[in-house]
Image: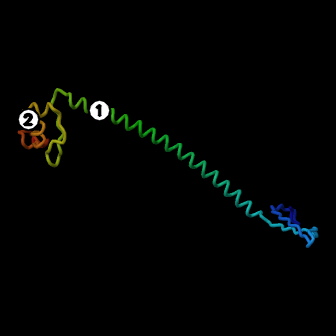
Amino acid sequence: MRRKDGSAIITEHTVTEIVDDSGQRTGLVRVVRDVTERKRAEEELTKHREHLAELVEERTAELQVEVSERRRAEQALRESEEQYRAIFEQAADSIVLIDAETGAFVEFNDRAHQALGYSRQEFEKRRISDFDVIQAPEEVA
């Protein structure tokens, strides 16, 4: 339908027959309802839903890429740690990592405790101060 000014409106029509007692149609009742705003709101809602679906799809794809990258990084880290562990354990020299505050052995290879005649369990209980070694660079002089 069009208004007097020529602008279009969206309408919804309902037509009901009017009948007399004998069942003869005597007229019609026509109800015209302006649904322009409702239709515009529905179209806007549809547009927003589609946009939201696109955003969800894009974010899902981004997350899949991030998960794949993280898995690759974790695998690379595991491989690197395995290499480090193999080098650390198979080294011909004694290797120890010492806690700077406590002097405790944080980690050590088998060569470290074997070279000094200790079992792994005995060596774990020791501190660097238990051995006659230089503990700080300033003690070198």
Element type where label 2 sits in the image: loop
Residue 124 in sight here: yes
Can you tell which quarter of the image residue 28 is in? bottom right
Taking depth in this image into account, of 20 and 74 the one nearest to the observer is 20
Of label 1 and label 2, which has the lower sequence position?
1
Taking depth in this image into account, of 84 and 19 the one nearest to the observer is 19
**Which residue was labeled with disc 1?**
82
From the viewer's perspective, is 30 left or right of 115?
right
Image: 139 above or below 51: above
Residue at the image point whose x is 13% and y is 33% from the top: 112
Q: Amino acid at mark 1?
A: Glu
Q: Residue furthest bottom?
A: 21
Residue 140 in sight here: no
Q: Position of residue 131 (x, y in %)?
A: 6, 40
From the viewer's perspective, is 101 left or right of 77?
left
Q: Amino acid at mark 2?
A: Tyr
Q: Which mark is residue 118?
A: 2
Element type where label 1 sits in the image: helix
Residue at the image point whose x is 83% and y is 67% from the top: 32
Taking depth in this image into account, of 121 and 135 the one nearest to the observer is 121
Image: 43 above or below 31: above
Q: Residues within 10 Å of mark 2 (few under 14, many from 20)?
A: some
Image: 124 above or below 18: above
The C terminus appears in which quarter of the rendering?
A: top left
Q: Position of residue 116 (x, y in %)?
A: 7, 33
